Image: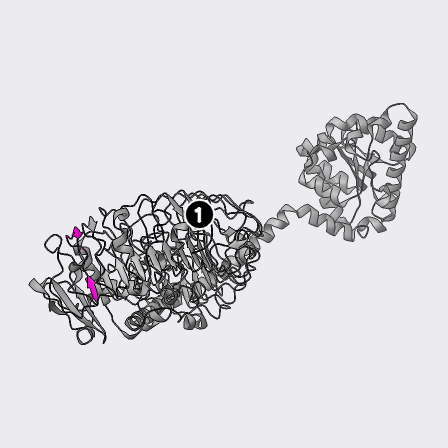
């Protein structure tokens, strides 16, 4: 346990070596427990982690996910899980403590059992891929792969600092780079038998733990060639003095004991070679001014969680150690720090300072003016309201500034007379403050990682994060804001490669998020949108131009569909996470063009079936991780191929999550276990093909029948129009017919027929009309009368009116007339004596006639005495005579023209 701390804190001394942490504004400080436990930490071998301390330790490609410590993140071997920074008090103000995860602390600070856990659990469950990525949603990506592996889901380099070999102590580098420990927390265990944990196979030969000191209070271990570790922690009040230890001890963990005072330098006379000392979680109340004077080589001093220690009375003791590189005073008692707090002390080598949880409501930058070597400064959890910056001396080398969990209302001032106050600042953590907007003047020439999540920012305005203000910004964390709108070009920064907007619950479908909001992000590679509202079309519209995207997280965005073109604009995608959405199926071929896709999470999205064309052989060959668990699979013939794939690839592609694939239609049956007779599937396929063909033909036939029935008169009349004039009447003599014209009209229109039609055609034109009230044979059946009269007439004239449309006999008579003229190729003449054409009362048959036959409109004004009436009357009868003449010649009655003498419905009487 103690060793774990040692490795971690020793490395903290040299932040430049550790800047390779991913997207870690908290860089060093947030790597300790208590940070946001966002985890999914890849547990690869020690060298991979040391070379980059990088992505695989991050929960979401961001700050080591604060909490990377939780399950062995970047510093897992540095033993974060419960080590070094563990009970040491991340809970109460760890040096690199809790971090921005929303105030949740990962590890209780004062439990010796937990400290043992440090040893027993750091890597106890050595899965290659952890499932802890979502303990806290602040972890830049809650569960990037659902509940499964997140390894490979994180960006590798975008959020890391530049490599640096310029700083760092040889011991720290040797400890970090030379050891290949599976469980650093087991290196020097505090168990009564000093036994090594079972999960570290190489530990016995590397470290050889054994009892040392009086009373077997301590376990000692050789570490490398130059270092000797003593773990004397966790004895509460039973150990208040350092027991006799070997003189060559260089690392001492004396935390969680009952020490309440160090009254002289004699306290450490038995361990004069110490380079690392942890006396955190004691009951220290008093320190003599010379308490550490014998420790001339002391590089790391951890004093966190000595809550009764008044720093204002202990400064001389602590700040007189000129060899210090790392100092952690978190969670002590200090309401204020004087402006000259560090001026009178020789801390010229101090590189990392942790003042978390001291109750400092105000920070004056002058306080740190004398700390010219300072690189990492943590002032988290201090309820700080404002920061005074009177000048810029003393802060020019700070690379990591942690101000999370304070009450800051204003974005920190970064310019002093146009000069940057923090010219080398690379990581700035402002999580969980009260900031509502950014400063107008921003001077952060080197800032790479900005974390302002959990602030009440409502609007992201145009050019808010533009390249002009943030020329080096590569990682931007905007989780848990109060966003209501995102204006056009709000980011507009070609340097930005990582953007997280998780947990904002923004509706991206509304106008408040403009379509140009994400323009200018030409090099963005990582996009995190989980827990917002999104549609497929809006996703393509807003982000389709981001051609450099490699990692897309759109889980929990309420997507109800994806199409074959959803990911077409992003040819370089390697990771897609879209778990917990609502689309029932994945389109075929949607992943075919993604030649670099290796990780895909579509878990818990209500998918019922998966097509083999969705996951072609090429796609399956590229995937290294696939999570489709938690979906509503319908286990049938269509899913047999997927069952076989699950069985064959369950230990590789599916990362053992295949046990969570269940049949929705077979309760309790895993997809890997359902069985169906293959012959049934073959028969089912043949039957389905035949059924489909039969049903298609049946539907086609019914459709044709319906169309013919609905438009039967239209069709018949069209045929009539084609062949009219070629029937029997064309070649017969006039005396063959009994009547020249058969008149079909409604009973209510008899006066018009008697007073207008008969006088004009019979008296003036000499035509013989068949008018049923006058000419039908008495005693004969009405139908027979109609049939014979039509048959004995050369022409048929219908008088359309509202009464005609309502009369069943008239409709029958019209149908009979139509049948006659169509069969014999005769001519049908139509007149309209009122506004029936505009009344909406036309029957389908009448409408078919009017749509295919020229008709003549009677204007009721022609019945009144006036010059206009006389002209209209003459025009009507002239056109009717012309139509009868043309019909007699076999021309089809076209002489009537349009027939509408009035021109519109409103003028008809």
Report the side of 479 relative to 780 (left or right): left
Name which quarter of the figure residue 632 lies in: bottom left
User: Going 79% across and 47% down the picture, which residue do you hit?
Assistant: 826
- Which residue ends up furthest to the top in the rendered image? 865
Q: Position of residue 372 (x, y in %)?
A: 40, 59
Towards the viewer: 507 or 392: 392
Instruction: Check the picture and name the quadrant holding the C terminus.
Output: top right
Q: Decide whether residue 254 is among the magenta residues.
A: yes
The residue that label 1 is drawn on is 504
x and y, in percent, of residue 899 in the image: 83, 39
Outermost left residue: 215
In the rendered image, residue 578, in percent from the top left (x then y), is placed at 42, 57
**Helix, strand or loop for disc 1:** loop
Residue 504 visible: yes
Q: Residue at x 32, y 47 (%)?
A: 103
Quarter of the view holding residue 193 = bottom left
Q: Position of residue 695 (x, y in %)?
A: 50, 57
Other residues around mark 1 within 10 Å, as few (<14) / some (14–19) / many (≥20): many
The quarter of the picture where residue 768 lies is top right
Between 481 and 444, the one lying in front of the other is 444
- Give the residue at x 27% y 55%: 318
Horizontal arrangement in the rendering, residue 502 relative to residue 838 (left or right): left
Task: Identify the colour scheme used.
Answer: one colour
In the rendered image, which quarter contains the N terminus? bottom left
Residue segment shown in magenta: 251-263
Q: Foreground: 699 or 360?
A: 360
Q: Quick check: is 241 in the magenta stretch? A: no
Query: Which of 264 and 590 lies nearest the eye of the viewer?
Result: 264
């Amino acid at each position: 346990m103690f060793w774990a701390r040692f490795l971690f804190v020793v490395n903290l001394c040299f932040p430049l070596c550790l800047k390779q942490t991913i997207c870690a504004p908290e860089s060093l400080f947030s790597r300790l427990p208590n940070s946001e436990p966002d985890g999914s930490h890849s547990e690869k071998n020690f060298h991979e982690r040391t070379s980059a301390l990088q992505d695989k330790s991050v929960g979401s490609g961001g700050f080591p996910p604060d909490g990377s410590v939780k399950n062995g993140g970047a510093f897992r071997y540095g033993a974060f899980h419960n080590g070094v920074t563990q009970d040491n008090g991340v809970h109460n103000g760890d040096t690199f403590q809790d971090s921005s995860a929303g105030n949740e602390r990962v590890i209780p600070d004062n439990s010796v059992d937990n400290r043992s856990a440090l040893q027993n659990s750091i890597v106890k469950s050595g899965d290659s891929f952890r499932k802890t990525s979502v303990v806290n949603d602040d972890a830049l990506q809650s569960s990037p792969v659902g509940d499964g592996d997140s390894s490979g889901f994180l960006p590798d380099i975008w959020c890391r600092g530049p490599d640096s070999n310029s700083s760092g102590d040889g011991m720290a580098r040797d400890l970090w780079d030379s050891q290949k420990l599976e469980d650093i927390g087991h290196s020097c265990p505090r168990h009564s038998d000093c036994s090594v944990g079972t999960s570290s196979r190489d530990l016995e030969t590397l470290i050889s733990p054994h009892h040392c000191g009086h009373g077997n209070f301590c376990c000692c271990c050789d570490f490398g060639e130059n270092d000797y570790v003593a773990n004397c922690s966790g004895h509460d009040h039973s150990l208040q003095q350092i027991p006799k230890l070997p003189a060559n001890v260089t690392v001492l963990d004396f935390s969680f004991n009952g020490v309440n005072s160090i009254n002289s330098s004699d306290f450490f006379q038995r361990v004069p070679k110490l380079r690392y000392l942890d006396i955190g979680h004691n009951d220290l109340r008093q320190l003599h001014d010379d308490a550490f004077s014998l420790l001339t080589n002391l590089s790391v001093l951890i004093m966190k969680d000595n809550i009764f220690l008044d720093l204002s009375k202990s400064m001389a003791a602590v700040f007189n150690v000129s060899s210090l590189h790392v100092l952690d005073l978190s969670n002590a008692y200090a309401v204020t720090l004087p402006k000259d707090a560090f001026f009178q002390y020789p801390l010229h080598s101090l590189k990392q300072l942790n003042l978390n949880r001291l109750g400092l409501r105000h920070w004056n930058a002058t306080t740190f003016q004398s700390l010219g070597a300072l690189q990492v400064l943590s002032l988290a959890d201090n309820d700080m309201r404002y920061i005074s910056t009177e000048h810029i001396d003393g802060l020019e080398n700070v690379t990591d500034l942690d101000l999370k969990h304070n009450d800051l209302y204003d974005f920190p001032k970064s310019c002093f007379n146009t000069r940057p106050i923090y010219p080398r600042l690379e990581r700035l953590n402002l999580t969980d403050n009260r900031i509502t907007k950014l400063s107008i003047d921003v001077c952060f020439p080197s800032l790479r990682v900005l974390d302002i999540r959990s602030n009440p920012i409502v609007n992201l305005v145009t050019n808010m994060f533009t390249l002009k203000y943030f020329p080096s910004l590569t990682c931007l964390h905007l989780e848990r804001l109060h966003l209501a709108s995102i204006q056009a070009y709000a980011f507009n920064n070609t340097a930005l490669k990582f953007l997280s907007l998780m947990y904002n619950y923004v509706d991206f479908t509304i106008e408040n998020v403009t379509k140009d909001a994400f323009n200018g992000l030409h090099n963005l590679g990582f996009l995190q949108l989980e827990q917002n509202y999104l549609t497929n079309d809006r996703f393509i519209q807003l982000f389709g131009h981001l051609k450099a995207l490699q990692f897309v997280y759109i889980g929990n965005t309420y997507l109800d569909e994806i199409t074959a073109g959803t990911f077409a604009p992003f040819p370089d995608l390697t990771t897609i996470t879209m778990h917990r959405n609502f689309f029932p199926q994945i389109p075929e071929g949607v992943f075919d063009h993604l030649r670099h896709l290796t990780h895909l999470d579509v878990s818990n999205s209500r998918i019922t079936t998966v097509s083999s064309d969705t996951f072609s052989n090429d796609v399956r060959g590229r995937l290294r991780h696939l999570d489709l668990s938690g979906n509503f699979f319908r286990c049938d013939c269509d899913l047999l191929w997927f069952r076989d794939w699950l069985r064959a690839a369950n230990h590789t592609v599916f990362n053992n999550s295949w046990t969570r694939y269940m049949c929705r239609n077979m309760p309790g049956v895993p997809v890997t276990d359902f069985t169906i007779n293959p012959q049934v599937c073959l028969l089912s396929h043949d039957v389905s093909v035949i059924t489909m063909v039969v049903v298609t033909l049946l539907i086609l036939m019914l459709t044709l029948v319906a169309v013919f029935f609905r438009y039967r008169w239209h069709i018949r009349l069209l045929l009539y129009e084609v062949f009219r004039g070629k029937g029997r009447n064309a070649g017969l003599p006039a005396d063959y017919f009994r009547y020249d014209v058969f008149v079909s009209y409604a009973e209510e229109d008899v006066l018009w027929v008697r007073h207008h039609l008969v006088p004009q055609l019979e008296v003036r034109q000499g035509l013989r009309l068949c008018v049923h009230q006058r000419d039908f044979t008495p005693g004969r059946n009405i139908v027979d009368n109609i049939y014979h009269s039509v048959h004995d007439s050369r022409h048929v004239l219908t008088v359309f009116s509202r009464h005609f449309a309502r009369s069943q006999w008239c409709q029958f008579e019209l149908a009979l007339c139509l049948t006659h003229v169509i069969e014999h190729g005769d001519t049908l003449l139509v007149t309209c004596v009122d506004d029936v054409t505009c009344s909406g009362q036309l029957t389908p048959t009448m409408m078919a006639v009017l749509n295919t036959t020229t008709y003549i409109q009677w204007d009721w004004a022609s019945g009144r005495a006036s010059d206009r009436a006389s002209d209209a009357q003459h025009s009507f009868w002239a056109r009717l005579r012309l139509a009868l003449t043309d019909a007699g010649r076999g021309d089809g009655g076209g002489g009537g023209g349009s027939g509408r003498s009035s021109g519109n419905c409103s003028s008809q009487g």
